[in-house]
Image (spheres, rainbow, N blue to C red):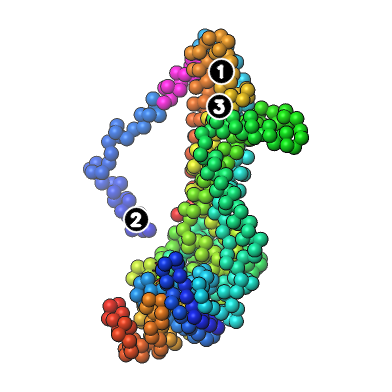
């Protein structure tokens, strides 16, 4: 450690420009400036240009709904994804009791069926199928009115079922990225498979899981726009309604695009901060 | 302490262990050698149930591992295993690594477990590293922590799978010294290693394996200097 310190000071006092130093102008992140300019211009139109006033008032009223859909769908699909993801890789020991072996076998196969089916269909058709066929079937089967589950919840449930499958794969990938030796070490000191999963594997898998999970969160926000086909009054639906009534397509869609891009950029920023924090808090770790 | 009878292990087409009979008595130190891929790790892993025997039986301290009714976790808690790659848990400190099973398996409270960790760390000579994370330690130190982690469970048998093979040469000795001390204290040990110095100094018996079978075994110096089988001789010629 002392040696590294010495090298560092030596380097710092070296008079010449380092041979391996990049030129500042080449590495400067121009894209941030360009993006800020673009979003700034859209924001200027949407918020400060009188021609956009009505469009902004009409459409921005749906922001809260869009966010509520996103948060609910994320929470539900995360829970579902954890169950399915761990179910997909459920294993037992050769001397586990029979019920555990049966449960693991069923868990693996059901999860796999679910994941493969959902991932085999594009999102929009699935939303129609789930919200307009499956959910009404279930309410009918339960013998309750179809409106027990309103458009909002039909949409949220459909989106959750879909993203549950995507998040399951993220969870599985995270767990499988941990070297086998970790499970073996846990088992060798007498921890059970579940104990090792909880105390050894999952905490490490978290770090591999958080970035793709953040991507899915943002993807849910964007795909919540598809629920506009179900008469859910989110920003996309409001923009379509206003534009088709007033023929103010330019105003409507400038406002709409501005709303999505600023929400996504703010979320990405917060997620990056969260990731940084998670890495910093565990200073000793690899 | 350990009784292996007619042990076979197949991985699909690969027949890794082909009929091994082996007894290890309490306090005995057995060193296993053999060419890469001959089934040493597989044999060792069968001894604590990380692999399940295809045929044959493995008994540890009177408990039959191949029996479905056996509580394998309980057997493993009494059988220490040290891996080539250490396999410490990276997000836990040295103390966290050692106390995890003490608390979850043996039900020790935090203070008891910490005290045991301290004792074991002193045994392996790095008590000052108690709060370090694995990545802050050298390979030799990590392996010593891994040994302490196993010893903390007060095992009846310790299994070592090439514990020094992943280490830089200057760190091999510190790990072997810990193992030598352990052997002197009467621990029952089965060690896969190519460190012949360790085998001579500590082993009661040297077992040479090839193609999943025991080819020759006996007093280490005897086997080493005067091998009866051509394959054994060939092998020792190669590793020296
Ligand atoms: N989990 C496994 N799946 C398939 N083949 C394996 C597995 N573990 C070991 N083998 C094979 O069994 C043979 C013996 O391996 P191993 O016991 O690791 O040998 P050694 O430790 O003596 O080098 C090798 O051919 C290896 O490829
Ligand atoms: Mg091996």
Dot 3 falls on which chain?
A: A
Q: Residue A193 occupies which quadrant of the picture?
A: bottom right
Residue tagged 3? A225
**Disc 3 and disc 1 on one polypeptide chain:** yes
Query: Which residue is labeled 2 in the image?
Result: A4
Which structural element holds mark 3? helix
Q: Position of residue A43 (x, y in %)?
A: 49, 19
Residue A5, picture quadrant:
bottom left
Of the image marks 3 and 1, the number of the one nearer the N terminus: 3
State the CA–CA distance, disc 3 to disc 1.
11 Å
Compare marks 2 and 1 and give the one earlier in the sequence.
2
Q: Secondary structure at mark 1?
A: helix
Image point (60%, 52%), residue name: A107
**Sequence-first tag of 3 and 2:** 2
Q: Position of residue B222 (x, y in %)?
A: 36, 90
* Residue B186 screen position, x and y as percent: 52, 85
**Vertical comparison of A160 with A88: above or below:** above
Q: Which of the numbered marks, if any, corresponds to residue A239? A: 1
Q: Which residues are magenta?
A: A35-46
- Mark 1: few, some, or many residues within 10 Å (few <14, many ≥20)? many
Circles 3, 1 touching at the beta carbon (< 8 Å): no
Position in image of residue A50 (x %, y %): 53, 9
């Amino acid at each position: 450690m002392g040696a590294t310190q010495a090298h560092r000071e030596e380097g710092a006092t070296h008079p010449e420009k380092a041979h391996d130093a990049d030129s500042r102008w080449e590495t400067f992140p121009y894209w941030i400036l360009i993006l800020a300019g673009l979003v700034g211009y859209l924001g200027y139109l949407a918020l400060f240009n009188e021609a956009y006033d009505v469009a902004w008032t009409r459409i921005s009223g749906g922001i809260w709904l869009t966010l509520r859909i996103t948060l609910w769908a994320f929470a539900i699909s995360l829970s579902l994804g954890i169950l399915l993801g761990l179910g997909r890789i459920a294993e037992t020991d050769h001397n586990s009791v029979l019920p555990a072996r049966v449960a693991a076998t069923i868990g693996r196969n059901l999860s796999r069926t679910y994941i493969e089916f959902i991932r085999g269909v594009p999102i929009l058709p699935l939303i129609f199928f789930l919200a307009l066929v499956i959910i009404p079937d279930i309410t009918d089967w339960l013998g309750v009115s179809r409106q027990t589950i309103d458009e909002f919840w039909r949409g949220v449930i459909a989106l959750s079922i879909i993203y549950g499958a995507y998040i399951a794969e993220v969870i599985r990938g995270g767990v499988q990225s941990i070297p086998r030796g970790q499970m073996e070490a846990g088992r060798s000191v007498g921890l059970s498979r579940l104990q090792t999963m909880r105390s050894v594997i999952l905490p490490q898998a978290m770090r591999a899981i958080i970035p793709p999970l953040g991507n899915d969160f943002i993807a849910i926000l964007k795909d919540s726009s598809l629920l506009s086909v179900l008469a859910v009054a989110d920003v996309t639906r409001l923009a379509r309604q206003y534009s088709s009534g007033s023929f103010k397509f330019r105003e409507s869609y400038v406002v709409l695009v501005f709303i999505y891009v600023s929400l996504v950029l703010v979320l990405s920023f917060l997620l990056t901060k969260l990731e940084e924090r998670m890495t910093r808090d565990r200073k000793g770790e690899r | 302490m350990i009784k292996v009878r007619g042990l076979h292990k197949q991985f699909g087409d690969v027949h890794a262990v082909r009929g091994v009979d082996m007894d290890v008595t309490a306090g005995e130190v057995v060193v296993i050698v053999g060419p890469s891929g001959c089934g040493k790790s597989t044999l060792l892993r069968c001894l604590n149930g990380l692999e399940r025997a295809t045929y044959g039986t493995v008994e540890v301290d009177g408990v039959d591992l191949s029996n479905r009714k056996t509580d394998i976790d309980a057997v493993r808690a009494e059988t220490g295993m040290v891996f080539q790659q250490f396999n410490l848990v990276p997000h836990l400190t040295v103390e966290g690594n050692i106390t995890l099973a003490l608390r979850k398996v043996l039900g020790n409270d935090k203070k008891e477990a910490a005290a045991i960790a301290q004792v074991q760390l002193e045994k392996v000579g790095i008590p000052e590293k108690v709060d370090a994370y694995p990545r802050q330690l050298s390979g030799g130190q990590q392996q010593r922590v891994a040994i302490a982690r196993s010893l903390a469970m007060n095992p009846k048998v310790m299994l070592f799978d090439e514990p020094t093979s992943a280490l830089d040469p200057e760190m091999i000795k510190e790990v072997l010294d810990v193992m030598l001390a352990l052997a002197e204290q009467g621990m029952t040990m089965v060690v896969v290693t190519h460190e012949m110095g360790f085998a001579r100094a500590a082993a009661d018996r040297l077992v040479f394996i090839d193609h999943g079978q025991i080819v020759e075994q006996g007093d280490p110096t005897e086997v080493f200097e005067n091998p009866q089988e051509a394959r054994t001789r060939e092998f020792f010629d190669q590793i020296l």
